[in-house]
Image: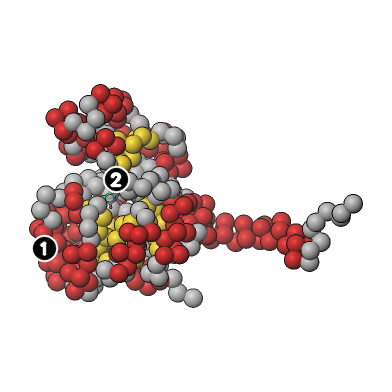
Amino acid sequence: MKNRVCEILGCRFPIIQGGLAYVGNGRLAAAVSAGGGFGQVGSGGRSPEDLEAQIRIALAATDAGFGVNVPLSEHRDVSPYFEVIERMVRQHPGRIRAVSLSAGNPRPWIPVVRGWGLAVMTLASTPEQAQKAEAAGADIVICEGTEAGGHNGPAELTTFSLIPNVVDAVRIPVVAAGGIADGRTAAAAICLGAEGVQMGTRFVATEECQAHPNYKNLLVASRAQDTVVMERSFGRITRVLRSPFAEAVLRQEAETPGSEAHLLPMISGRMNARAALEGDVEGGWMNAGQSVGLVHDIVPAADVVRRVAAEAARILQQRSAQWQAWTDESIRSTDEGTHNPPSR
Ligand SMILES: Cc1cc2nc3c(=O)[nH]c(=O)nc-3n(C[C@H](O)[C@H](O)[C@H](O)COP(=O)(O)O)c2cc1C
């Protein structure tokens, strides 16, 4: 029995590394793909030239296929990014397998990317968005619950609620994202009907990720409750690590909600880069999801892929046997109508 996500992306495990603004580098994407997952070079926080450089690094580091993430509304002019991807696809046929489109309307770009022979993955945070993406020709829909690190949908559905609703609403394969960082959480997503998982926070704490060691160490030290949501006063949901800087942003948002003059300098990508790349974790903000509570070490990205794949397989088998043992007898007696206490 084939897994549709693996078939579409050409990977061994349906485990995807999400687009990671500023820190989704070519070396990380290559390491994830070489390990059997599906790595993606992130264009968020990069110039088109830097995106090209990172794609070239990934091409040189592995023979495996990988993807590119384009957070559409994060770029003032998105066309140069697609020009880079098209050029790389033509120069290195078969190596870039998919583009994931997030943070904006993917519809105009789906036929363009498919026209290059690539698969399209779109991000969705409600069943309706997933249906629209399917109707527009997306090959895979990645459903991201509000536990996830980075920008999330305004409906703030949790992964646990979102996935089964989307699975009921579309026919294309559903990939679950948000809150997944180990075999248990991946197995849970599979039980909800997802055919694959995408992780972001877990992949930041890997050896190949270009995030500053201070950021990675902070992820390891943080608990599940150590994230906060910024930018709510702008109508956006951005989940970041709790830090003195993030707390200052929240205080400022409470005082001057939605004020561009006060808040834009604080929530800018520059302040993300200061912490995430330069290591000033007190002087900037860092994306992270609630899955951070499950991040306990900094390891090679391929180890994350292997661990999650093996642990999920073991857990799915174990739990299914356990559940049957716990419930078989009760289900039989319920079916036979013998579960009711005798009437007096
Ligand atoms: C550091 C970081 C940066 C992110 N940047 C992007 C991005 O540029 N584009 C995007 O589509 N998603 C982005 N995300 C979301 C991830 O791709 C992924 O869907 C999410 O992290 C999944 O939830 P998790 O953090 O619980 O693993 C980012 C997440 C993190 C943690």
Instruction: Give the numbered dot on residue 151.
Output: 2
Instruction: Left or right? Give the position of 206 relative to 161.
Output: left
In this rendering, is residue 28 above or below 237?
A: below
**Residue assigned mark 1:** 83
Looking at the rendered structure, the kind of residue marked 2 is: His
Q: Position of residue 225 (x, y in %)?
A: 44, 34
Secondary structure found at label 2: strand
Quadrant assignment, res 213: top left
Instruction: Left or right? Give the position of 254 relative to 299.
Output: left
Residue at image position (41%, 37%) is: 220
In this rendering, is residue 10 above or below 248?
A: below
Closer-to-camera residue (169/14):
169
Give the total number of marks visible in the rendering.
Answer: 2
Q: Position of residue 75 (x, y in %)?
A: 15, 50
Looking at the rendered structure, the kind of residue marked 1 is: Glu
Task: Count residues near mark 2 (Cα–Cα under 10 Å), then give few for <14, some for 14-19, many for 20+.
Answer: many
Task: Count residues near mark 1 (Cα–Cα under 10 Å), then give few for <14, some for 14-19, many for 20+.
Answer: few
Quadrant assignment, res 174: bottom left
Q: Position of residue 276 (x, y in %)?
A: 26, 38
Asked if the beta carbon under badge 2 is closer than 8 A to the nearest atom of ligand 1, the reply is: yes
Secondary structure found at label 1: helix
Instruction: Left or right? Give the position of 87 relative to 97.
Output: left
Name, please, the residue furthest toward the right: 344
For residue 110, say whether it is visible.
yes
